[in-house]
Image (cartoon, rainbow, N blue to C red):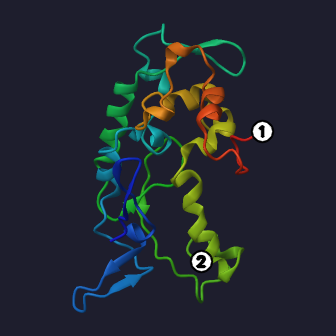
Amino acid sequence: MGIPISYSDGRVRAGLSCAACHATEDLETGKVMEGVPNLDFDSGLITALATNSTAFFPTADIESIRDYIRDTNRTIENSKGEEEALPDPIALENAVDETFIKWRKGIFDTTPDLVANPTQTPDAFTFGAHPYGWNGFSLFGPFKGLSTFNNEVHSFNSDSLSFSEHSDTLFDIDKEVYMATILQNAASKKYRYDVSSNEKPSDFFRSVDDTTNIQGEMKE
């Protein structure tokens, strides 16, 4: 439940839908209860098993990516025109996995603050909770705020690159370094950044981005 299977580009693909976290089964009737949190879903384990869990390092206990620099010659030009070393992809990946693997089932962390502080997956109900809901999410938006709840996951929860324009302020990490850190071990070769290319990560991503007609932080 909540894991749609598809076939494209010669590969079988398994994805995650909202139902993976926000629906569960009534064991007595066998019926799906939509909106009820799935307390059996092990998001930490699934994320840790991902090829590039580093993409979500801001939700792990990573005080500084500089602690994972192993080769000072692996550098890129940052947004200020200065050379800056990148963290070792394996060392950082292992540290992120070590955090995620400790999460218990039914919890998740959606706060990009470089601290692992997951909380229980909430229900997806807003009826009777307007205008506040469980954390204020239903204060605005159609359907008593339900659309806001449903669409929040499509920002950071699904695309950590959406914070690249603010990484310097939020994480004290230059935009180019932030993007390179996420993309240097991308699961898809198409999006994998080559440190030796001498290309800025933002320019590289722009060249392979299939959604150039969508307004967002990475578009100019």
Which residue in the rendered view is the most extreme toward the top?
A: 73
The residue at the point 54 percent across, 15 percent down is: 197
| Three-letter code for the amino acid on which mark 2 is drawn | Gly
In the picture shown, does residue 77 fall above or below 20? above
The residue at the point 41 percent across, 21 percent down is: 88
Name the image quarter holding the N terminus: bottom left
Left or right: 100 as drawn, with respect to 175: left
Element under disc 1: loop
In the picture shown, does residue 52 fall above or below 35? above
The residue at the point 63 percent across, 32 percent down is: 207
Dot 1 and dot 2 residues touching (CB under 8 Å) = no
The residue wearing badge 1 is: 220
Which one is nearer the viewer's eye here, 78 or 216?
A: 216
| Three-letter code for the amino acid on which mark 1 is drawn | Glu
The residue wearing badge 2 is: 133
Of labels 1 and 2, earlier in sequence is 2
In the picture shown, does residue 126 fall above or below 49? below
Which residue in the rendered view is the most extreme toward the right?
A: 220
Residue 66 at x, y percent in the picture: 49, 22
Residue 194 at x, y percent in the picture: 49, 21
Which one is nearer the viewer's eye here, 128 or 22?
A: 22
Residue 149 at x, y percent in the picture: 58, 70
Which one is nearer the viewer's eye here, 137 or 207?
A: 207
Element under disc 2: loop
Q: Quadrant of residue 15?
A: bottom left
Please say whether residue 215 is visible from this viewpoint: yes
